Image (tube, rainbow, N blue to C red):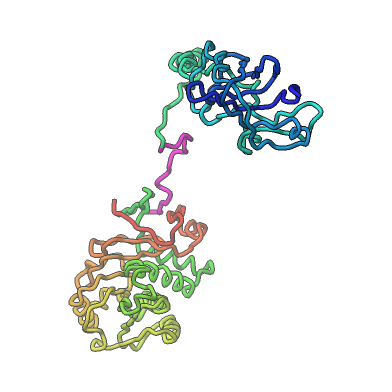
Amino acid sequence: MAEAWLDFLVSVDCGSSLGVYMGRIFSVDQKMQTLSLSQPYRNGVRCTVGELTLRHGERSVQRGSCSPQQKEQGCHAQSATTDTSTDGCSGALNKAIRRRHNSWSSTTRFPGAGTPRKAGNRGGVCRGRDKSDDCFADDLDNLLDTEFDFEGNLALFDKAAVFQEIASHEKCNGVAQRVKYRHDENILEPQPAVFRQISVPEQSKMEYCTDTGLVVPAVTPELHRQLLAAAERGGLTLERRMEVVGICASQMALMLLGGSSRLDPKNSHQRPSVVVLCGAHEQGAQGFACARHLANHGVSVLVYLPNCTKSPPVIAAELRLLQGTTATCTSQHAGLPTGPMDLLVNCLDCTNTYAAQREQPWYRSVVAWAGGSRAPVLTIDPPASGSATPGGLQSKWSLALGLPLALGEGAGRVYLCDLGIPESIFQEVGILYHPPFGCKFVIPLHST
């Protein structure tokens, strides 16, 4: 019967003074009333001795074992009681007990308790421990008796000496020293940046630059007309350019008005108001296109067009499209609003006729009204002389098309609109061109 208990994992309580011993039974002597454990643990800490013998006594409890009859039936042990002497644990007192120094021994209270089975009895497993230990516990034979000295092992590695050896080796073999980079620096050596990617046939009197440092030279009005004429011949018709300008100008205006914060459906009682001042020419038609897109986006739009006997066909076409929106039109000075407004879009001036047009009474009255309104002014396609010419509106922003003209201080902050002109058309008029727009269709320009 004593042999039936062999190879079981047990826990023996020797009282509060001696503690709890755990181990695997390898010998039971009924005559001497002794129980021998291999690879024993005391209170969860492994003993330095490989074997330990406990003697029978008066009171103690042994947990996690099964009776021989239960083991042969393949039971899983619940608990059973037997008597061992607290004096019988004295065999462990003269043995040095290893103290616990790391968290591993504390988290693995009963290490090595895998799935002990008696030979020939595959169904019977008796253990007095948590079920999770059956899956994650290590075998007792694989445990180390000594701790790993992390500090001592780390002290063996001389980092400075190793790097010095690497540096001396590279120096002897002609390898260039590695450059130390910050965390925000690119370790790849980039190609040298070319900031002058646009050149014109004649030296420009004025140059701009983008936010990324690209140089954008100003062109003369004559060269700008040649560029648009070449675009017309290449298939980029006036109507197509009007639509591009209308979209870009309206997007810029929407951002100036506050964007989504002003055009939110929950904020319909504060719809932004815009007045578009148009002349009877192609620049005025660009204002009609801008007004149409603004109205389609929920902006309250009023368009002013003076009474003129001669207007280009593009004006009539844009006016028909505008009449299908919520925008309103007026040709009288009295029809202009008297209250505050959010933005004025200026399309009054034409590069060819702006000087003569500014002498007209209607022009002077509109400019006087705009100055009294105190609304900021966005000018689309301003003439080369700029809005600083006597009689013109003072702009806060100006939108140039394709390539900028030389504009004065009265033009305000200059932006550039991408008309979609191919590089081959620029080359046709003698302009070496690479698009400076990047991922945008409208970019700010800065005077150099």
User: Where is residue 179 shown, x and y percent of the image?
Assistant: 43, 27
Task: Look at 61% across and 21% down and name the residue there.
Answer: 143
| Among the 4 quarters of the image, the one containing residue 323 | bottom left
- Residue at the image point whose x is 44% and y is 59% from the top: 440
Main SS, magenta region, reads loop
Query: x, y percentage for residue 25?
Result: 68, 22
Q: Is residue 27 visible?
A: no
In the image, residue 231 above or below residue 160: below
Quarter of the rendering occupied by the N terminus: top right
Q: Residue at x 36, y 70 (%)?
A: 254
Which span is picked out in magenta?
184-202
Asked if residue 186 lies in the magenta stretch, the reply is yes
Residue that sits furthest to the top in the current view: 94
Judging depth in this view, the residue of 125 and 362 nearest the camera is 125
Between 256 and 279, which is closer to the camera in this rendering? 256
Residue under the point 39% across and 76% down: 265
Residue, far front: 58
Horizontal and vertical percent for residue 383?
A: 31, 68
Q: Is residue 417 visible?
A: yes
Residue 113 appears left or right of 351: right
Q: Residue 398 appears in which quarter of the rendering?
A: bottom left
Q: Nearer the viewer, residue 41 or 203?
A: 41
Q: Nearer the viewer, residue 32 or 325?
A: 32
Percent position of residue 409, x then y:
23, 61
Instruction: Give the quarter of the image for residue 336.
Output: bottom left
Q: How many marks?
A: 0
Q: Look at the picture and state if 428 lies above or below 152.
A: below
Image position of 405 (left or right of 439): left
Q: Is residue 353 left or right of residue 132?
A: left
On whether residue 78 falls in the magenta region, the answer is no
